[in-house]
Image (spheres, grey):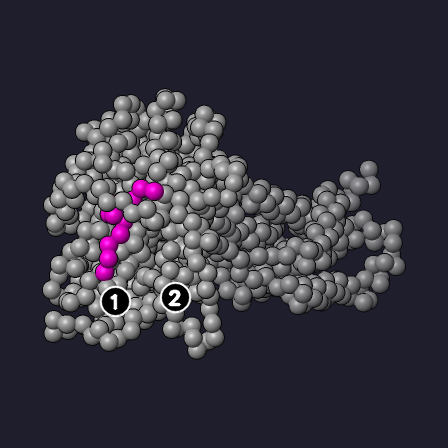
């Protein structure tokens, strides 16, 4: 065992017996009544004399609250009857040079006892059964390991760093103040409530501030809030440079997460530097500061909103302070008292103490009561007595502390598995123009989260308007954001083009493509269903086309009957004889295609839309090629090439050509349909708000069939043009030429329209082009012959034809 005075010695002559109270069981207390800076300089190993450091009245109030709490418990007949509590309190003003008092709390009979064998460890008894404090997270981190080793309960009233929730490192740590996780959550909710996006976060450069900053950064991740600027404030920060950075980035919301002393220096610098038009969000450590709200020029810096511990009135405390201050406690000094148990606070009046910042008053009060209740349960107190035979060890008190469940000033005091309080709430305050912290809302944690701010109570510096703080203004409706800098809050706006939309709630940075069945105009926030269009059978245009197709079939049937009756007449023979019936039949079969241009397209409809017309119209063209060749051959080629005419007649060249043309076209169509048949197609390009149901035709796959049709047209045109000067009654070549010109003109017009228009009525125009192709031969080739048969029978005689031929021969011989 080692005498403590060999380690630290007695460094102070003056005492203040407010720091000590004898009792059956002692509670340690650590309060930083005086505070020193982290950069405190010393050139030799010595404990610091806290009296030489700045005095903080609010912390002195907390110190007095612990004294009051112990006295109130001692006067109680229900809690710890026949047992008196004492205390040993130290002014813990430094985390590195205030260890004499800490070590004294470990004294056992005036000695520090090292650990013995495992079975002896629990027989060692420390001087105190538990410790209240310290206040700051940095001080707690420094001294906590000393208490954790012996499982001496530490119930802190101000250390909010989230690291203390880790029970593996801090098994005997509890607190009556909520961890910084909760206060940061409140700050986040305030920022979110007012829709602020561009934030500065100033924190103390210590464990408390750094932990708060890390928690805030983690909390705003994946939100629209951006941390534009952050700075850890040490003892000598460059305030002009800090505020210059904030002004340069146009930041109007400043979160100050620092202890009271640093916050005071910061706000005073802001006043001196004429920083205006800001919203300051105060952490719980300084939001109820009594001096700053009444400082001259405070109104110029903007609006101050803060998160605070609820102000709880503690009955009897005022009377205790007045009674305590009426006594002189410095008359009986003990020469062997340890230092930092001296206050020298005779100049502080009771009114000063009661007017000090009341933050953390209830946490101190509840911390002392939690220890008392734990001791009460450990000693199995009941029926007005406690069992004095029970040996009380700190680790047993710790076990009961963790199970705390009692009511104190309408609060049900409990701790969770991390030693954090399972009760309480936060107040949200506003520094009004009277210099008071006015409550404007609350954030309840238990039994469930409840958040409320009364906006009407806030007097904004902008004449009633809530200030805004954004890097870039919100995009207009229908515009997507495009990152402009490293922060997601800084962006440019781009309007979403046709066929896209932006969903600001899901992804405001992307123009989302509409589905093929949907459309949107430029700058849309949603897509609309496209109107599906096609020509039904009931459409007037469809009905007209189908009627014309039926009329064509009727006319060809009538012409076939008329030609059959007059089969042996010269006019029928000159028209082609039996070939006329083949042409008329193919024209009728070609008209079948017209009926498949209407109604909702299907694969079979698309196939039958092209197949009958291409196949049978190909036969018609082949017939006209043969017919025009025969006419030219009779009058012009036969005399020059008699063998050609003999071969043509011997092998029935006309039917051979027609058969080859038909077979070739059928083979080409079979190949085309096998490779890429026509199929339904949704036209979505031409009209963004419509879907035109149509059929697609692969021109490459059908190029062979198209080339064959073009070849037959060309041959037909060549042979018919060669016979343009033949006898009048044998002038079928002229009629064929005229029909071909109509055919070519029809499809040129249709191709031009297709390039300019792709609406649903293109199907009607396509059907009309097919009918025009059919009617051109029907009306300009066959109808004149029907007219002669019916109305000019005198021209339908051999004599008339022979006369015409003789006249042509005379003309040619001249």
Q: Position of residue 735 (x, y in %)?
A: 64, 47
Q: Residues within 10 Å of mark 2 (few under 14, many from 20)?
A: many
Q: Position of residue 781 (x, y in %)?
A: 61, 51
Residue, disc 2: 151
Picture quadrant of residue 97: top left
Most distant residue in the front direction = 335
- How many numbered markers are drawn? 2
Residue at 36 percent across and 43 percent down: it is 12
Q: Is residue 163 above or below residue 242?
A: below
Residue, disc 1: 374
Nearer to me, 772 or 358: 358
Picture quadrant of residue 264: top left
Picture quadrant of residue 195: top left
Q: Is residue 348 above or below residue 397?
A: above
Left or right relative to 159: residue 18 = left
Q: Which residues are magenta?
A: 13-23
Q: Position of residue 210 (x, y in %)?
A: 45, 46
Residue at 39 percent across and 69 percent down: it is 124
Question: Is any atom of residue 620 visible in this view?
Answer: no
- Asked whether disc 2 touches disc 1, contact meaning CB atoms under 8 Å apart, the reply is no
Nearer to me, 528 or 466: 466
Residue at 44 percent across and 28 percent down: it is 239
Left or right relative to 770: residue 690 = left
């Amino acid at each position: 065992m080692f005498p403590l005075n060999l380690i630290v010695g007695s460094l102070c002559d003056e005492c203040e017996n407010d720091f000590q109270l004898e009792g059956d069981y002692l509670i340690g207390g650590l309060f930083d009544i005086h505070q020193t800076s982290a950069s405190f300089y010393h050139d030799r190993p010595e404990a610091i004399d806290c009296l030489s450091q700045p005095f903080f009245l609010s912390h002195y109030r907390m110190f007095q609250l612990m004294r009051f709490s112990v006295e109130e418990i001692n006067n109680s007949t229900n809690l710890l009857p026949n047992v008196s509590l004492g205390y040993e309190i130290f002014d813990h003003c430094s985390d590195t040079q205030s260890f004499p008092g800490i070590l004294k709390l470990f004294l056992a009979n005036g000695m520090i006892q090292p650990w013995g064998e495992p079975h002896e460890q629990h027989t060692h008894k420390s001087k105190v059964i538990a410790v209240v404090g310290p206040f700051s997270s940095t001080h707690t981190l420094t001294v906590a390991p000393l208490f954790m080793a012996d499982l001496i309960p530490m119930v802190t009233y101000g250390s909010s760093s989230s690291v203390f929730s880790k029970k593996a490192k801090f098994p005997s740590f509890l607190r009556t103040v909520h961890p910084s996780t909760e206060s940061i959550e409140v700050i986040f909710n305030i920022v979110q409530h007012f829709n602020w996006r561009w934030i500065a976060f100033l924190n103390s450069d210590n464990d408390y501030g750094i932990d708060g900053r890390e928690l805030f950064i983690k909390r705003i991740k994946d939100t629209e809030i951006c941390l534009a600027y952050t700075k850890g404030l040490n003892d000598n920060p460059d305030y002009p440079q800090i505020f210059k950075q904030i002004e340069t980035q146009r930041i109007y919301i400043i979160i100050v997460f620092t202890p009271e002393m640093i916050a005071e220096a910061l706000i005073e610098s802001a006043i001196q530097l004429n920083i205006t038009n800001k919203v300051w969000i105060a952490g719980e450590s300084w939001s109820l500061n009594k001096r700053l709200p009444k400082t001259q020029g405070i109104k110029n810096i903007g609006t101050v909103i803060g998160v605070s511990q609820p102000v709880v009135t503690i009955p009897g405390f005022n009377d205790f302070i007045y009674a305590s201050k009426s006594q002189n406690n410095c008359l009986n000094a003990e020469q062997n008292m340890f230092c930092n148990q001296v206050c020298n606070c005779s100049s502080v009046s009771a009114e000063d103490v009661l007017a000090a910042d009341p933050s953390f008053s209830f946490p101190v009060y509840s911390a002392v009561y939690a220890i008392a209740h734990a001791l009460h349960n450990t000693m199995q107190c009941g029926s007005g007595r406690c069992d004095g035979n029970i040996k009380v060890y700190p680790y047993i008190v710790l076990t009961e502390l963790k199970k705390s469940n009692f009511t104190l000033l309408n609060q049900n005091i409990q701790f969770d598995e991390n030693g954090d309080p399972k009760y309480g709430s936060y107040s949200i305050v506003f520094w009004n123009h009277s210099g008071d912290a006015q409550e404007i809302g609350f954030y309840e944690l238990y039994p469930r989260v409840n958040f409320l701010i009364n906006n009407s109570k806030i007097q904004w510096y902008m004449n009633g308007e809530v200030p805004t703080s954004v890097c870039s203004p919100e995009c207009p409706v229908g515009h997507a954001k495009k990152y402009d800098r490293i922060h997601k809050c800084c962006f440019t706006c781009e309007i979403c083009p046709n066929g896209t939309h932006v969903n600001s709630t899901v992804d405001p940075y992307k123009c989302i493509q509409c589905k093929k069945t949907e459309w949107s105009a430029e700058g849309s926030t949603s897509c609309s269903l496209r109107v599906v269009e096609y020509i039904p059978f009931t459409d007037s245009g469809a009905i007209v086309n189908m009627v014309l197709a039926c009329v064509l079939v009727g006319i060809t049937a009538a012409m076939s009957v008329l030609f059959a009756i007059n089969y042996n007449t010269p006019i029928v023979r000159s028209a082609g004889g039996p070939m006329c019936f083949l042409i008329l039949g193919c024209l009728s079969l070609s008209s079948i295609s017209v009926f498949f241009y209407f109604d909702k397209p299907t694969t079979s409809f698309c196939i039958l839309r092209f197949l009958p017309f291409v196949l049978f119209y190909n036969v018609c063209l082949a017939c006209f090629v043969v017919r025009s060749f025969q006419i030219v051959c009779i009058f012009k080629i036969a005399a020059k090439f008699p063998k050609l005419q003999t071969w043509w007649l011997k092998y029935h060249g006309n039917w051979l050509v027609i058969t080859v043309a038909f077979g070739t076209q059928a083979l080409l169509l079979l190949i085309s349909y096998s490779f890429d048949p026509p199929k339904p197609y949704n036209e979505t390009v031409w009209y963004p708000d419509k879907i035109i149901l149509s059929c697609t035709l692969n021109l490459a796959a059908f190029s062979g069939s198209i080339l064959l049709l073009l070849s037959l047209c060309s041959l037909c045109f060549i042979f018919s043009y060669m016979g343009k000067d033949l006898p009048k009654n044998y002038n079928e070549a002229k009629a064929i030429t005229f029909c071909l010109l109509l055919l070519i003109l029809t499809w040129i017009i249709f191709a031009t329209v297709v390039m300019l228009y792709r609406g649903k009525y293109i199907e009607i125009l396509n059907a009309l082009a097919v009918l025009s192709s059919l009617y051109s031969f029907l009306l300009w080739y066959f109808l004149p012959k029907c007219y002669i048969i019916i109305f000019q029978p005198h021209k339908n005689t051999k004599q008339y034809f022979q006369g015409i031929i003789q006249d042509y021969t005379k003309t040619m011989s001249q």
